[in-house]
Amino acid sequence: MSQTTMRPLKVGLVLPTNEGWMAGSMARWSDLKTMARHAESVGFDSLWLADHLLFEFGEPGEPPRGMWEAWSVLSALAAVTTRVELGPLVVCTSFRNPTLLAKMADTLDEISGGRLILGLCAGYHEREYRAFGYPYDHLVGRFEEALRIIHTLLRVGNVDFRGRFYDALACELRPRGPRCSGPPILVGTPARSPRMLRLTAQYADYWNGWSINQVDDRLASARQALDTACVKAGRDPTTLQRTVTVLVDLPGSKKGPVAGWVQRYRSLFAPPATGSSEELISLLRGLAQEGISHVQVWLEPSTMDGFDAFVPVLELLDRD
């Protein structure tokens, strides 16, 4: 599905579905459709959407920000694009029943012609759980059961499971999408969570690290932790693809909400990458040398002008 087979890694683009993310404005569906088609035409390999319902991005006391529901937008994007891979970054399994989510994934894979990467996570932001009425206890325990159900349904087509949090009794996926084993599964998790790494090694095709904006000890530590988890699970570490999300503050860009979010959520956001096209291409090449097969870039500004400003990086990458 990649634009070119010459690239050392795939480069995806995170689209702005949050309030204020598009240079302070809310992207409407017409904006997202235009952005997606343009990103596909200029050579991005994939498109990604955050999966949140309500998020406290601002300063304490500010109202929370909302965003479009990710799966609805992904389904629409599948129908208006033809080449790029598509994925949520990442779906919180607490927000949708796992059997239904597997059904939704197979259906979206059908609409897209086999272009879905199913990104999954356990969730963490308590504000949206409370607001939308989802239980906030045992997040990883709930995720483990959900992941087991989703994986079995997609890979086998049926499951019979009774757990502490979910039941799936004599459940079948019918009809099936274009891939008999369903779309690949990506698990987003910090490398410091041994239990989540174990689940990644057991069930995932891809691992995703969030806000890995430079090649440093943090990336090396993640690689070692993933390799160890795979060995413990009896899996060849080379069979688990590694992906990272990279925040990029484009030189000369008008400062939008990213700077404030990075400052407030230091545990989630490392300082964004920045620099010339040559410096950014050096970063991507470095990530590829460290075993990263796919990056999702979150650009600031997240606008058509911002996307075009990144195109020279894609062009340089194509020369590798």
Image (tube, grey):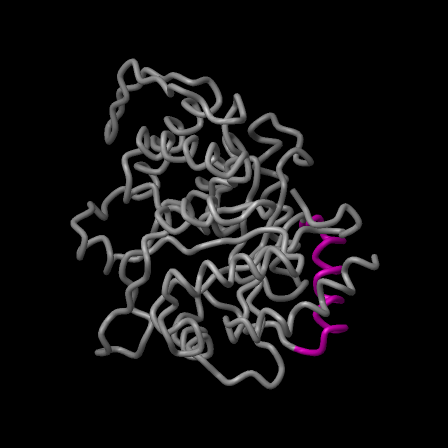
Residue nearest the observer in this picture, 115 or 268: 115
Q: Tell me what residue is drawn at x 51 percent, y 85 percent.
A: 254
Report whether residue 174 is seen. Answer: yes
Q: Where on the picture, by quarter, is residue 305?
A: bottom right
x and y, in percent, of residue 33 in the image: 46, 58
x and y, in percent, of residue 256 in the image: 45, 80
Q: Tell me what residue is drawn at x 30 percent, y 57 percent.
A: 125
Quadrant location, the N terminus = top right
Q: Tell me what residue is drawn at x 44 percent, y 40 percent.
A: 195
Residue nearest the observer in this picture, 150 or 221: 150
x and y, in percent, of residue 152 in the image: 43, 22
Tell me which segment is drawn in magenta: 275-292
Is residue 319 shown left or right of residue 126?
right
> Is 44 situated above or below 179?
below
Residue 284 magenta-highlighted: yes
Q: Tell me what residue is drawn at x 24 percent, y 28 percent.
A: 164
